[in-house]
Image (cartoon, rainbow, N blue to C red):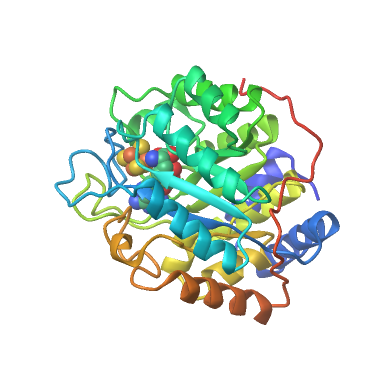
């Protein structure tokens, strides 16, 4: 498929349903050639809702006056035990940028998880840290790190974040993570305020250049109480097209069908898989903390149990002809050395 910038712009804006169907079909062909009909499950553990940052879009931003929590090592291990029994072989520990999560504490948790579940991958998503800190987490056994770049346009980045958050630092973190040997996840929200075709083209160029092992994209959803609470949500259709384009551009990428898509559309995750995605991330967090991790409004499966979320997603994937193997689901491409610049 022609991925010139003029054709990409056309694919993002066309109202021709045949062109869009062709795009999805090609994306699935590319995915199936690398990963077959497998959808990899990751168990999401929302480890802390404390955050020192004030990202304008996020319901966990520091200025939100909300009840906060963090999970203990024992609670996290308990989530992993439940997840392991349900067939999960990757645990994703995600949270706000919480000063309590020192290197020592995070390393201790990572070591404990790796010791008890040596056949599982540990993914961290704890925001920006220094290179030394990332190096310690890697040394402790963390395999992957998710840090969305949020937008590859510095002016747009400044619109979404307070002045103390620097685009250059975010890029430096991604560079450090790559150099330290993590499988790296970048990504962005679709439909964030002031996003345009021009900024999306920069995101696609960035992904093409940096070739992250994982790309998390999902629609922006307004969060009550944030500066963007009255902004419109992102488009499901545009998100699906971007997923398909990213798959064709980078056939080996691990591409989640995000919960944000499932929140905006009852078949959002199935549609993402049909557009070339191959990862799902059911929630393994304790039932009583889920509602407190409210990044955006009406977040999916807030009250359900881990077993229920996992069974639901498995059934959904099987219904559309996909397998859900009990595997770590590592990146299958060759090791990538590209830099952010
Ligand atoms: N604090 C870490 C970080 O920022 O990388 C991890 C947790 S953060 C909640 C994970 C991701 O949620 C962010 O990268 C952002 O893209 C997404 N997110 C935050 N607010 C959102 C919103 N209102 N709608 C959709 N996604 C959102
Ligand atoms: Fe904190 Fe991450 Fe939310 Fe930003 S997106 S406020 S860093 S939890």
Q: Is residue 32 left or right of residue 69?
A: right
Q: Nearer the viewer, residue 138 or 244?
A: 138
**x and y percent of residue 338 in the render?**
71, 25
**x and y percent of residue 45 in the render?**
44, 54
Query: Which residue is outermost to the left?
Result: 65
**x and y percent of residue 165 in the render?**
34, 25
Q: Please give the name of the residue rendered at 75% of the width and 30% of the height, measured from the top-left corner.
A: 336
In the rendered image, the vertical position of residue 39 relative to residue 120, given as above or below: below
Query: Which residue is outermost to the right?
Result: 33
**x and y percent of residue 278 in the render?**
67, 59
In the rendered image, the vertical position of residue 187 relative to residue 336, given as above or below: below
Q: Is residue 118 left or right of residue 203?
A: right
How many labels were placed on the picture? 0
- Looking at the rendered image, the quarter that the C terminus falls into is top right
Q: Please give the name of the residue rendered at 65% of the width and 53% of the height, measured from the top-left corner.
A: 11
Q: Please give the name of the residue rendered at 46% of the width and 36% of the height, measured from the top-left corner.
A: 108
In the rendered image, the vertical position of residue 161 relative to residue 288, given as above or below: above
Q: Please give the name of the residue rendered at 50% of the width and 37% of the height, measured from the top-left corner.
A: 147
């Amino acid at each position: 498929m022609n991925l010139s910038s003029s054709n990409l712009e056309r694919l993002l804006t066309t109202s021709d349903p045949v062109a869009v169907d062709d795009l999805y079909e090609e994306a699935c062909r590319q995915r199936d050639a690398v990963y077959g009909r497998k959808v990899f499950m990751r168990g999401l553990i929302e480890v802390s809702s404390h955050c020192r940052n004030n990202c304008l879009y996020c319901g966990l931003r520091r200025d939100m006056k909300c009840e906060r929590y963090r999970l203990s090592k024992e609670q996290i291990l308990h989530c992993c035990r439940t997840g392991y029994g349900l067939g999960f072989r990757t645990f994703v520990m995600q949270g706000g940028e919480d000063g309590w999560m020192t290197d020592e504490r995070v390393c201790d948790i990572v070591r404990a998880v790796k010791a008890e579940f040596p056949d599982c991958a540990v993914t961290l998503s704890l925001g920006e840290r220094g290179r030394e800190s990332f190096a310690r987490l890697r040394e402790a056994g963390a395999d992957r790190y998710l840090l969305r770049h949020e937008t590859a346009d510095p002016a747009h980045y400044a619109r979404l974040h307070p002045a103390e958050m620097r685009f250059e630092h975010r890029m430096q973190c991604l560079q450090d993570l790559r150099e330290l040997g993590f499988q790296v996840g970048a990504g962005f929200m679709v439909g964030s305020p002031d996003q345009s075709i021009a900024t999306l083209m920069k995101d696609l160029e960035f992904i093409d250049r940096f070739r992250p092992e994982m790309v998390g994209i999902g629609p922006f959803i307004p969060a009550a109480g944030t500066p963007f609470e009255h902004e419109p949500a992102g488009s499901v259709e545009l998100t699906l097209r971007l997923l398909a384009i990213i798959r064709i551009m980078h056939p080996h990428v691990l591409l989640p069908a995000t919960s944000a898509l499932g929140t905006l559309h009852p078949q959002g995750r199935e549609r993402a898989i049909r557009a070339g995605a191959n990862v799902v991330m059911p929630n393994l967090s304790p039932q009583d903390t889920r509602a407190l991790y409210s990044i955006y409004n009406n977040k999916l499966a807030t009250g359900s149990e881990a077993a229920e979320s996992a069974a639901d997603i498995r059934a959904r994937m099987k219904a559309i002809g996909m397998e859900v193997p009990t595997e770590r689901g590592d990146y299958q491409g060759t090791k990538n050395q590209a830099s952010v610049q």
